[in-house]
Each structure stands twice: as structure tokens, then as C-alpha cells.
Image (cartoon, rainbow, N blue to C red):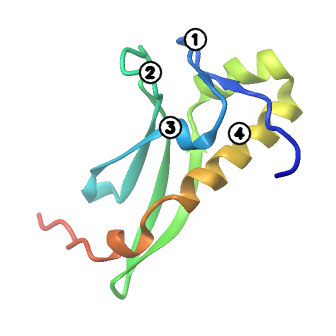
Amino acid sequence: MGEEIESIQCPCGRVIENPEEYKVLYLKHELQEIDILCPNDSCYLRELGYIKFELQEGKAKFKEASFYPPFVTWNSGRLGADEAEAKLKNHLKMIAKKVDWTRLGLQKPATT
């Protein structure tokens, strides 16, 4: 399927060979945010990044995605800044592709 992606690693030690391994959690309804979690259930960081979206006319639209600095810095130190940035961007793209955007769009906006 093309070139092999060198593994990203969480500071907890968990090697993430495939972006499919991350866990995604839609808990922050009012913030319209999806958490990207480490696949290691006992990870001390746990939350590695996020995907933000907007609800427009009953549809969820991607807004932005990012990994948090400790995760990025750890991988930059291991792989070099340029290589880590490219691989982490690729991971974010692949994670965003597996989100069920249609289902998110069906969610009712939070009322205060």
C-alpha cells in the first residue's frame, strides 16, 4: 500500500504503528470536540489530542485537529521535528477520516 509509516510513540511507552489504534471519545458535546486517546488504558497522559467540529444545518463539519504538546515534543525528540510533524499530521488525517461525521450531525445541540 505504499511506504510504511514509522511508528509514533506515546510518552507512556505505547508504540502506535497504525492510526487505527487510537481511541476516539465524543464526550465534550457542548464543546463540539472529540478526544483522541492513547490506546494504552493505563497511560498517564491518556488524552493525546482532539478534533473540533461545527454543526451547520444538521451536518458536522471538520474544524481543526491537533495533538497536544507533550505528545508532539516526545515524538519530535525521537524522530526529528520534520519527520514527526509529517507523521503526526498523517495520523490526524487518518483519524478524522474514521469519524462518523453523518452520525455527529444528527446530535442535538446542547441546551444551557
Secondary structure at badge 3 equals loop
Secondary structure at badge 2 equals loop
Reading the chain from its start, which is encountered first: label 2 or label 3? 3
Identify the residue at horizontal 33%, vertical 84% (top origin): 58
Please say if 60 is above or below 39. below
Identify the residue at horizontal 26%, vertical 57% (top origin): 29
Reading the chain from its start, which is encountered first: label 1 or label 2? 1
Q: Amino acid at mark 2?
A: Asn
Q: Which mark is residue 13?
A: 1
Q: Amino acid at mark 4?
A: Leu
Mark 1 or 4, which is nearer the eye? Answer: 1
Reading the chain from its start, which is encountered first: label 3 or label 4? 3
* Residue carrying label 2: 40
Left/right placement of residue 22 relative to residue 58 reads right
Marks 1 and 3, Cα distance to the nearest angstrom?
A: 14 Å
Left/right placement of residue 53 relative to residue 4 reads left
* Residue carrying label 3: 22
Marks 2 and 3, Cα distance to the nearest angstrom?
A: 9 Å
Marks 3 and 4, Cα distance to the nearest angstrom?
A: 12 Å
* Residue carrying label 4: 88
Marks 1 and 2, Cα distance to the nearest angstrom?
A: 9 Å
Q: Residue placed farthest to the front in the image? A: 1
Q: Are marks 1 and 2 in contact (CB under 8 Å)?
A: yes
